[in-house]
């Protein structure tokens, strides 16, 4: 696992490259390497997980240079195949096969990879060209800045590092606030910075002086033409899923560094924990699996520590109960915003950041989690409501409103007239492909929702958050549920094996877990793994004081996009009638302002709505 960065058709001196590398030191503290020439550079910060004595980056083979972030789980198979073609390898690190793989298969090299990765190749054999690739689920993002007119290109694994390049300016996308409130973080290739984008999942990117930047999207695992198996029973589907997950969890335990598991107390992480503990026992390993759960000092709603402890006892793990004092949250928020690089409206960010810091402090560099199961196996209440809704297209608006940090009606009431006019001129905050998928793509309603969740929401909102906040503490997260084999299997489930209103969600996954985790966990009501922000954002709590300060009428008036009187009304409502809707709206607005303070020296100054003006001029 690493952090990577680079340039094309840009001259960067050593001081600039060192500055960019230093901004991602937390994600690769074990070694640094860079290759640069007058008009290109590739750099790497390494977190050594596989073959710590080998694997020095950048990798070189003839006139091909490669840097890599992630894990390649089928590297042994690929190494054997490439060795049969005459290639020689000096070490057993997974990434060392990449130059030979690229030389053998060219731009289609990523089609042979099984894992989570972002890769950058500089090929100088003929016309200079840079090739980049991202994994099928978007677990390892790459942010970039492309100056089309000048042909200059910069990329990095994290936004703050990308902004460390002299040629990349930190300028706010003024309409980004609307995109953020609409989906909790920008979807698609969009970020909160003007001119800065993120490559989509399953992308292969080719960059040359003649043709510029070309992006090709490979089919994601769920888009590979698999159809539901209508002849298979729910029990058979559960048995097959359990066997598949068992195999993948066993593969993901292989590392030359200590591996732990995150156990929230819900179905997904509990099943991963049980399978991991069993795999270690069956493999003859010494010692038990270490598991981690996070809770908060005091008494709060939705505390899951008792369920997590029960799972740990049943699996025979060494359990670590992490407890965080909510009084520290205001200080943590600044750290979280800085590492994410842009606001994410889910309060779970504080929990995630604190949990992985504790995992690393306990001596672990790798952690297995249950993330992404809800997206694959239909575990969210918004899916149940959409499926149960009447025929017609009205269910689409309801589903999309469930994705928002602030529901549409409340969002519109918060905007000043000027900002409302501006965002209407810009156009929809969500990528147009989302409505197109939901409205007219083939498949059932639930299948269309799953396609949106996996292509848009999972990479942007979920996987980037997990990646950035775990690597902030030098911890590599491995996700069994995003393995291509598991994603493909999920595509073969019928709707009834996923979700039936009134009977339950994730039905095949619950079936797979039978007999592996305690019945108390299987039968408990589903609840999200998150921060109980509604209870914590109340008068007398430190979060309340912070929110009042950050969202002061003076700051909001200076910004010019949000009505101060409407925010004051939200504070009054939260003080007297606390609700999830209002508390999340306040949290989201506060997180946005903290992001502005962190990344813009002029935060609090009036916003000039450049983008809407430009769009209106083009329309004229």
Image (tube, rainbow, N blue to C red):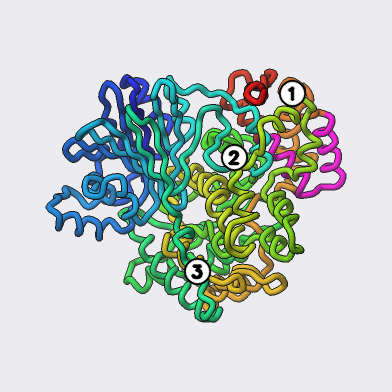
Q: Quadrant of residue 507?
A: bottom right
Residue ranking furthest to the front: 620
Q: Is residue 271 above or below residue 566?
A: below
User: Is residue 145 in the magenta section?
Assistant: no
C-alpha span from label 2 to label 1: 21 Å
C-alpha span from label 3 to label 1: 50 Å
Residue 363: in sight, yes or no?
no
Q: Mark 2 touching mark 1, by CB under 8 A?
A: no
C-alpha span from label 2 to label 3: 31 Å
Count of marks placed on residues: 3
User: Is residue 582 in the magenta section?
Assistant: yes
Does 107 sit left or right of 384 as displayed?
left
Residue 178: in sight, yes or no?
yes
Magenta stretch in the rendered image:
565-591
Nearest to viewer (mark 3 / mark 1): 3
Residue situated in front as seen by the camera: 169 or 351: 169
Q: Picture coordinates of residue 152 (x, y %)?
A: 39, 24
Q: Name the residue carrying label 1.
A: 560
Q: Mark 3 touching mark 1, by CB under 8 A?
A: no
Q: Which mark is residue 227?
A: 3
Q: Name the residue carrying label 2.
A: 186
Q: Secondary structure at mark 3?
A: loop
Q: Picture coordinates of residue 44 (x, y %)?
A: 33, 36
Q: Is residue 182 above or below residue 170?
A: below
Q: Residue at x 55, y 76 (%)?
A: 511
Q: Mark 2 touching mark 3, by CB under 8 A?
A: no
Q: Earlier in the sequence, mark 3 or mark 1?
A: 3
Q: Main secondary structure of the magenta part?
A: helix
Q: Earlier in the sequence, mark 2 or mark 3?
A: 2
Q: Residue at x 70, y 54 (%)?
A: 396
Q: Picture coordinates of residue 522 (x, y %)?
A: 61, 72
């Amino acid at each position: 696992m690493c952090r990577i960065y680079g340039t094309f058709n840009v001259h960067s001196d050593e001081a600039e490259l060192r500055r960019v590398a230093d901004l991602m030191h937390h994600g690769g503290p074990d070694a640094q390497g860079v290759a640069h020439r007058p008009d290109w550079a590739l750099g790497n910060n390494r977190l050594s997980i596989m073959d710590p004595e080998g694997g020095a980056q950048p990798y070189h083979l003839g006139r091909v240079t490669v840097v890599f972030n992630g894990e390649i789980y089928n590297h042994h198979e690929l190494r054997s195949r490439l060795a049969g073609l005459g290639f020689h390898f000096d070490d057993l690190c997974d990434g060392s096969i990449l130059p030979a793989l690229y030389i053998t298969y060219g731009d289609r090299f990523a089609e042979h990879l099984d894992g989570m990765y972002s890769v950058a190749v500089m090929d100088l054999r003929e016309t200079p060209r840079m090739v980049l690739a991202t994994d099928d689920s978007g677990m390892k993002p790459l942010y970039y800045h492309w100056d089309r007119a000048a042909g200059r290109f910069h990329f990095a694994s994290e936004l703050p590092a990308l902004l460390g390049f002299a040629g990349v300016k930190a300028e706010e996308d003024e309409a980004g606030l609307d995109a953020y409130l609409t989906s909790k973080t920008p979807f698609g290739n969009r970020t909160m910075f003007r001119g800065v984008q993120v490559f989509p999942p399953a992308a292969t990117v080719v960059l040359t002086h003649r043709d510029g930047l070309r992006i090709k999207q490979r089919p994601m695992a769920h888009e590979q033409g698999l159809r539901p198996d209508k002849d298979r029973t729910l029990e058979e589907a559960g048995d097959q899923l359990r066997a598949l997950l068992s195999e993948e969890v066993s593969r993901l335990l292989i590392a030359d560094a200590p591996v732990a598991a995150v156990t929230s107390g819900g179905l997904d992480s509990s099943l991963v924990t049980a399978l991991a503990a069993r795999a270690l026992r069956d493999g003859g390993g010494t010692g038990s699996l270490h598991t981690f759960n996070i809770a908060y000092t005091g008494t709060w709603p939705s505390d899951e520590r008792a369920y997590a402890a029960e799972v740990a006892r049943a699996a025979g793990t060494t359990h670590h109960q992490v407890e965080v004092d909510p009084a520290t949250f205001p200080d943590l928020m600044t750290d979280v915003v800085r590492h994410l690089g842009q606001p994410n409206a889910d309060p779970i960010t504080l929990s995630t950041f604190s949990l992985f810091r504790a995992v690393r402090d306990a001596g672990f560099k790798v952690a297995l989690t249950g993330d992404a199961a809800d997206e694959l196996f239909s575990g969210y209440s918004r899916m149940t409501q959409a499926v149960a809704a009447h025929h017609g297209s009205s269910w689409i608006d309801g589903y999309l409103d469930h994705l928002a940090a602030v529901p549409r009606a409340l969002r519109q009431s918060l905007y000043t007239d000027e900002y409302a006019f501006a965002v209407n001129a810009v156009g929809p905050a969500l990528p147009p492909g989302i409505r197109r998928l939901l409205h007219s793509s083939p498949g059932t309603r639930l299948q269309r929702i799953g396609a949106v969740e996996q292509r848009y929401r999972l990479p942007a909102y979920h996987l980037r958050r997990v990646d950035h906040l775990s690597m902030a503490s030098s911890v590599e997260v491995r996700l069994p549920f995003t393995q291509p084999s598991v994603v493909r299997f999920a595509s073969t489930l019928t709707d009834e094996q996923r979700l039936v209103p009134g009977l339950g969600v994730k039905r095949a996954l619950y079936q797979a877990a039978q007999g592996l985790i305690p019945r108390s966990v299987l039968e408990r009501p589903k609840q999200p793994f998150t921060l109980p922000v509604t209870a914590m954002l109340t008068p007398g709590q430190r979060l309340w004081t912070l929110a009042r300060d950050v969202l002061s009428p003076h700051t909001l008036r200076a910004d010019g996009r949000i009505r101060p009187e409407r925010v004051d009304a939200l504070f009054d409502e939260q003080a007297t009638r606390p609700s999830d809707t209002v508390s999340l709206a306040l949290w989201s607005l506060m997180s946005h302002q903290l992001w502005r303070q962190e990344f813009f020296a002029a935060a609090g100054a009036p916003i000039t709505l450049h983008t809407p003006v430009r769009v209106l001029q083009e329309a004229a």
